[in-house]
Image: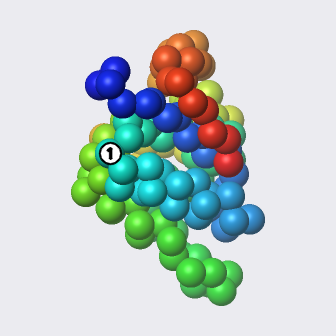
Amino acid sequence: MDQSKKSVAIINASAPFSKANAKDSLDVALIFGSYEQAISLYFQGDGVYQLIAKQQPELIQQKDFLKTFAALAFYDIENIYVCAHSLNQRGLSGNFSIENVQVLNQDDFSTSLHQHQTVLRF
């Protein structure tokens, strides 16, 4: 990670369509990315549901903001981590909607997270 940039970790801990947190965290990541900040995204707890492929939010009258994940690479947001424990607790596998997601055990997840100067939780 480029040390001349302020490093920001964004923790996604909310399910994608239960409240605005998931969309807000993605918006914040893209804003920081547009200013070329070093951004890392972390998914834990119910936030891991944001990464699941082939969701159908229109069935619950929700707009599919998850398609915006495709823009992460354009903003050079490539550090994407998910907590293995959270996946296991929910019976989920690594069938993610975006590429380059790194599954980390709890210790590595925590260690990686603590390397950032700023941590935002959604």
Q: Which of 58 and 94 is in front in this view?
A: 58
Establish if 62 lies above or below 73. Answer: below
Q: Which colour scheme is used?
A: rainbow
Instruction: Give the total of numbered labels.
Output: 1
On screen, residue 26 versus residue 16, left or right, reads: left
| Quadrant that contains the N terminus | top left
Residue 116 in view, yes or no = yes
On screen, residue 11 versus residue 6, left or right, reads: right
Q: Pointer 1: residues within 10 angstroms few (<14), some, or many (20+)?
A: some
Q: Position of residue 23 (x, y in %)?
A: 59, 63
Q: Position of residue 109 (x, y in %)?
A: 54, 22
Q: Residue at x 53, y 24 (%)?
A: 117
Query: Can you tell which quarter of the image residue 18 is in?
Result: bottom right
Q: Nearer the viewer, residue 31 or 21?
A: 31
Q: Which residue is drawn at 44% across and 36% down?
A: 40
Q: Which of 95 and 37 is in front in this view?
A: 37
Q: Residue at x 53, y 55 (%)?
A: 28
Establish if 103 lies above or below 96. Answer: above
Kind of element beneath mark 1: loop
Establish if 2 lies above or below 38. Answer: above
Residue furthest to the right: 19
Q: Position of residue 121 (x, y in %)?
A: 67, 41
Q: Position of residue 93 (x, y in %)?
A: 48, 42
Q: Which amino acid does label 1 sit on?
A: Glu
Circle 1 residue: 36
Q: Which of 116 and 12 is in front in this view?
A: 116
Query: Can you tell which quarter of the image residue 90 is in?
Result: top right
Query: Can you tell which quarter of the image residue 68 is in?
Result: bottom left
Residue 90 in view, yes or no = no
On screen, residue 37 versus residue 47, left or right, reads: left
